[in-house]
Image (tube, rainbow, N blue to C red):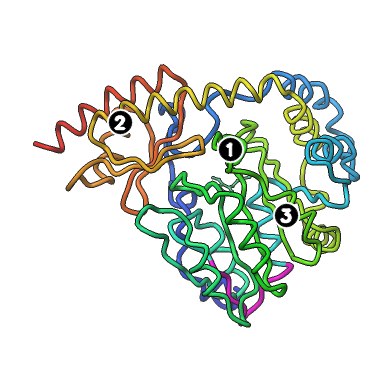
Amino acid sequence: MDVQKLLCKTLREKPETKRASRKMGAIDFSKLIRMGLNENAFGVSPKAIEAMNAIAPEGNFYQDWSQADLKGAIGEHYGVTPEFIVTGCGSSALTDALGTAFLEPGDEMILEMPTFPAIIDTAQMNGATPVVVDMGEDLTYDMDKLLAAITEKTKMVYICNPNNPTGTYVPKDKLMEFARKCPDHVIQVYDEAYIEFAEAEDCLEMVDAMKEMPEKPIVLLKTFSKFYGMAGIRCGYILAQPEIVEWLSKCGTQFAISKVSQAGAAAAMRDKEHCEFVKKEVARCRKYLATEMQKLGCKLYPSQTNFIFFQPGEGIDPTLVFGKMMERGIMISAQAGANRVSIGKMEHCELYIKYLAEILDELRK
Ligand SMILES: Cc1ncc(COP(=O)(O)O)c(C=O)c1O
């Protein structure tokens, strides 16, 4: 079979993906302490587990297509009605839907690097051209550069706030200024996958921008994978104006998430006690890791997320740090010329610091 001949042109000509998850192959995760994928080490809400267990025996019946309970929970949280919400199997599926609905050959999509590379795939899968702007040396967004890169061909601009993998953020007033200045023909996508972890007073969601500027195509990408600890349950959502939601609902998202996902996600969002616990534990462990890594001579980028991006030290190759950490049973990540460690439980953070000290000693010799 010559599958190349069967493939559509955009996929046949698409450059190789940069997504780490597609390159991992057969890693035996069961033997690893997972501090490499920005998962939530503090677990699923007990109330969500209860809700998922309760609904599982009804799995022979299709789910609630109106998603009344889940959209109700999201709506209560953000003060929006269901017409402003579309759900999907993780925010990744919704990113794909954005591409299907809005991108086509000739369009440009602007992003700053380093960021979450899935959005590049989305552009390329739909024949659009990713236009990459480099972040400044402190690895924060340069909003002026982003604005200056916009042309008549720009269909979409992607802003990850706080950003993966850097952990850095754009203050709300700067984002609002950008949102106002961004021309109406450009879809502004704010990926807020990690924003619930943020502690800085000016690291804030853009939901009010979406409500206050209905003439602007503003899209907020949200997920239950990170703060709500449900990466494997696969549930995400978009908040946007109803006319955008309506079209996204026609792109394979509408009936995608299972009734187990719906029940779990709704219960997780309403479980304020677990949310508070997660936020406090992540902040405590992040502070411990930051202090100890600085003592070991690493250069850290300030993080508002459940991970820390860092340079291991002058002349030290981040991929060697990654490899030596894997040999010891802890998975972190090496990307964009640095390392990224996701916040684990305190006992795992302590073990990681012990290993990091050994590894840096070895590599400095
Ligand atoms: C910035 C960002 N957006 C989206 C996602 C994907 O989230 P989901 O699991 O909801 O597809 C990730 C996952 O790592 C991420 O880092």
Q: Which residues, given as a range, are shown in magenta?
A: 101-110
Quadrant of res 126: bottom right
- Amino acid, disc 3: Ala
**How far across and down, in percent of the image, does residue 311 sit?**
29, 44
Within 8 Å: ligand 1 and the Cβ of disc 1? no
Dot placed on the residue nearer the N-terminal end, 2 or 3: 3
Circle 3 residue: 209
Mark drawn on residue 282: none
Q: Nearer the viewer, mark 1 or mark 2?
A: 1
Circle 2 residue: 293
- Is residue 313 left or right of 217 when viewed as pictured? left
**How far across and down, in percent of the image, does residue 251 sit?**
77, 61
- Amino acid, disc 2: Met
Looking at the image, residue 270 lies above or below residue 339: above
Circle 1 residue: 201
Asked if the residue at tag 3 contacts the one at tag 2, i.e. Cβ–Cβ closer than 8 Å, the answer is: no
Q: Which element carries disc 3, helix, strand or loop?
A: helix
**Residue at the spot 57% in from the left edge and 34% down from the top edge:** 197
Q: Which element carries disc 1, helix, strand or loop?
A: loop
Dot placed on the residue nearer the N-terminal end, 1 or 2: 1
- Is residue 63 left or right of 274 when viewed as pictured? right
